[in-house]
Image (tube, rainbow, N blue to C red):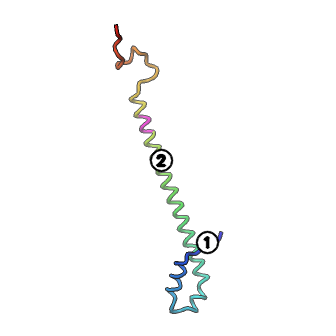
Amino acid sequence: MRSILQVASLQGYLLRNKVRPRECVDEVAEWVQSERETRAKMKKEKAEREAKEKAEREAKEKEEKDKLAKEVSQSAIPLYMTTDQCSHRRPRRS
């Protein structure tokens, strides 16, 4: 995969080396390689950071979901209770 350098990066390189144009031309291959390595490193770090953030976000969502499920299960009336066991039932009409 070939990485494409941004025009601004090249322009910055040329401006930093404007007082030594011949050396700049001789060193451009090294600079291109360095830029590619730097960009690859930054891309890898970004992917790792995003993966870590995603994992943390998913863990937090799971924790909240489990907490909510626990609260609901503790507050809900069990399905196996009969109507005689329910304290909140309405009184029968006569």
- Name the amino acid type tagged 2: Ala
Magenta stretch contains residue 67: yes
Q: Residue furthest right?
A: 1
Relative to 64, residue 17 above or below: below
Q: Main secondary structure of the magenta part?
A: helix
- Residues packed near mark 2 inside 10 Å, few (<14), some (14 to 19) or many (20 plus): few
Q: Position of residue 64 (x, y in %)?
A: 43, 42
Q: Amino acid at mark 1?
A: Ser
Place residue 21 in its image quadrant: bottom right
Q: Residue furthest front?
A: 94
Q: Position of residue 17 (x, y in %)?
A: 52, 88
Q: Which residue is mark 2?
A: 59
Kindly state the secondary structure of the residue where label 1 is placed: loop
Earlier sequence position, callout 1 versus callout 2: 1
Q: Quadrant of residue 88?
A: top left
Q: Quadrant of the C terminus?
A: top left
Q: CA distance from mark 1 to mark 2?
A: 35 Å
Residue 57 relative to residue 89: left or right: right
Q: Across the whole image, how many numbered discs are drawn on residues?
A: 2
Specify the segment rendered in magenta. Answer: 66-70
Q: Quadrant of the N terminus?
A: bottom right
Which residue matches tag 1?
Answer: 3
In this view, the mark in front (1 or 2): 1
Classify 10 Å Cα crowding around label 1: few (below 14), some (14-19), many (20 and above): few
